[in-house]
Image (spheres, helix red, strand yellow):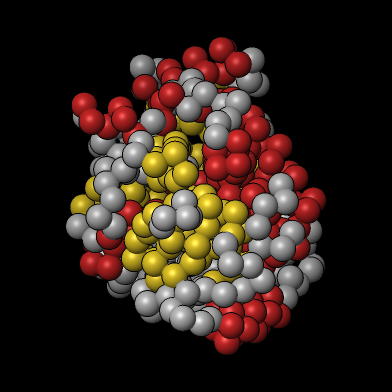
């Protein structure tokens, strides 16, 4: 195996948060959070959480991308709220990490996503302003495939329907514009100049800081085992250490760990996927020269996507290429030569020299719904619980707007966004 540097050390996280010459003191924030949790533990009596109030307006389970965004949005609206996370702050075990997550406005999956994406762009910009942390990098995004590719057809249709700016490129155009790339003669491209990537670790930390600034409480290293109703109409969230937290409303963003609950509001199957970083042989693969891309090519095991080197190497992965797992605890988190070889081969055929040496690798988990569409809704059996999950390997870019939607659902009972596509009820027939 030639992928020798592990992903996810404390050094890596600190490096991700150190951008544009500014250091964001992740350790200080972590120490503050630990001190708060010690106070919470000291105040716990009778097996139930006792903090500044006996019952919160809203409890949020899971503080990855969706949960941290929901926590911040609920807190900003003045509701008393607490976030509960089974792992440490900024952990790397779920689907909300990886240094870069693609964002683009043209969307082939379904036209219903585009209004959410347009708001997501603005909401990411707002988070940068509120948190002071750089989060979005614009690189442009190039989609490549045969003219009849569903990915390209869908992207073109969404651009036309919503008046989005794209540029159509022939193979010759791509070779001229991006000489590091090797499109086949019959391939075409769609270039979206507004595309780029979100830095996920920075985004989550940004939302947690905003939530703290607006009075939200947080508990880390506290697994949730379930929830139930009490006679006083409160929801009681049960924790793995035997304690509990009472709230009037609940938001559950459990990611792959939905499969550990008896509740089956979100039917999922889980897939192991591997993200890799390579040291390129030339500066032509650096950000500013090379766009982010997604390539749908016959002969590849799955669509190849990737990002230019912005100091961490060229990142690449095969979308949806991995084995099914039954539980998140059973995922193999080691990166093997069999994980590296198909990605390296595909990347080198697309951009020769971009994958000179694998320098880092990370396993993540896709939480897949039967049809690949999200679930964002009030629980079908409990209107006091909002659920979000099944983001199927393409959800991170939406986290900024999903957080707003979840706050709408628990505080207002509804939202202005059309969520028909994301109803869990559709899964009964799949």
Q: Looking at the image, which residue sits at the far top?
A: 161
Q: Nearer the viewer, residue 120 or 211?
A: 211
State the quadrant of the N terminus.
Answer: bottom left
Q: Nearer the viewer, residue 137 or 83?
A: 83
Q: Residue at x 60, y 36 (%)?
A: 412
Residue 128 in view (yes/no): yes
Q: Nearer the viewer, residue 215 or 355?
A: 215
Residue 229, placed above or below residue 89 = above
Q: Nearer the viewer, residue 191 or 62?
A: 62
Residue 29, placed above or below residue 290 = below
Q: Residue at x 50, y 39 (%)?
A: 293
Tag count = 0
Residue 429 x, y percent position in the rendering: 21, 26
Residue 245 x, y percent position in the rendering: 49, 67
State the quadrant of the C terminus.
Answer: top left
Q: Quadrant of residue 192?
A: top right
Left or right side of 131 for 260: left
Q: Quadrant of residue 294?
A: top left
Residue 280 in view (yes/no): no
Q: Residue at x 52, y 57 (%)?
A: 247
Residue 76 x, y percent position in the rendering: 72, 51
Left or right side of 43 for 367: left
Residue 40 x, y percent position in the rendering: 59, 79
Q: Residue at x 47, y 59 (%)?
A: 61
Residue 359, placed above or below residue 231 = below
């Amino acid at each position: 195996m030639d992928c020798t540097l592990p992903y996810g050390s404390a050094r890596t996280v600190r490096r991700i948060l150190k951008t544009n010459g500014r250091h964001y003191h992740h350790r200080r924030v972590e120490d503050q959070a630990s001190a708060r949790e010690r106070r919470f533990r000291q105040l716990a009596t009778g097996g139930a959480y006792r903090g500044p109030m006996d019952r919160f307006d809203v409890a949020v389970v899971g503080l990855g991308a969706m949960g941290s965004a929901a926590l911040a949005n609920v807190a900003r609206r003045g509701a008393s709220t607490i976030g509960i996370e089974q792992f440490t702050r900024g952990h790397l075990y779920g689907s909300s990490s990886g240094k870069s997550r693609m964002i683009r406005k043209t969307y082939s999956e379904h036209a219903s996503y585009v209004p959410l994406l347009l708001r997501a762009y603005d909401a990411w910009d707002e988070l940068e302003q509120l948190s002071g942390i750089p989060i979005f990098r614009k690189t442009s995004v190039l989609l490549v495939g045969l003219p009849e590719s569903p990915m390209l057809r869908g992207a073109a249709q969404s651009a036309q329907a919503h008046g989005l700016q794209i540029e159509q490129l022939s193979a010759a155009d791509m070779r001229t514009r991006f000489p590091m790339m090797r499109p086949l003669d019959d391939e075409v491209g769609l270039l979206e100049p507004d595309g780029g990537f979100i830095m996920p670790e920075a985004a989550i930390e940004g939302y947690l800081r905003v939530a703290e600034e607006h009075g939200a409480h947080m508990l880390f290293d506290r697994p949730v085992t379930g929830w139930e109703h009490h006679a006083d109409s409160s929801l009681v969230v049960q924790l793995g250490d035997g304690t509990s937290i009472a709230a009037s409303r609940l938001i559950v963003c459990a990611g792959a760990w939905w499969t550990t609950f008896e509740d089956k509001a979100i039917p999922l199957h889980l897939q192991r996927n591997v993200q890799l970083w390579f040291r390129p042989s030339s500066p032509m693969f650096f950000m500013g020269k090379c766009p982010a891309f997604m390539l749908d090519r016959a002969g590849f095991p799955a669509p190849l996507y990737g990002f230019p080197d912005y100091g961490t190497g060229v990142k690449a992965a095969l979308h949806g290429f991995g084995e099914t797992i039954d539980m998140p605890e059973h995922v193999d988190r080691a990166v093997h030569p069999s994980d590296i070889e198909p990605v390296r081969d595909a990347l080198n055929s697309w951009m020769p020299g971009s994958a000179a040496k694998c320098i880092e690798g990370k396993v993540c988990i896709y939480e897949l719904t039967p049809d690949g569409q999200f679930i964002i809704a009030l629980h079908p059996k409990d209107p006091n619980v909002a659920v979000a999950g099944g983001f199927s390997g393409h959800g991170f870019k939406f986290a900024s707007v999903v957080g707003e939607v979840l706050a709408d659902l628990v505080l207002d009972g509804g939202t202005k966004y059309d969520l028909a596509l994301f109803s869990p009820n559709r899964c009964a027939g799949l």
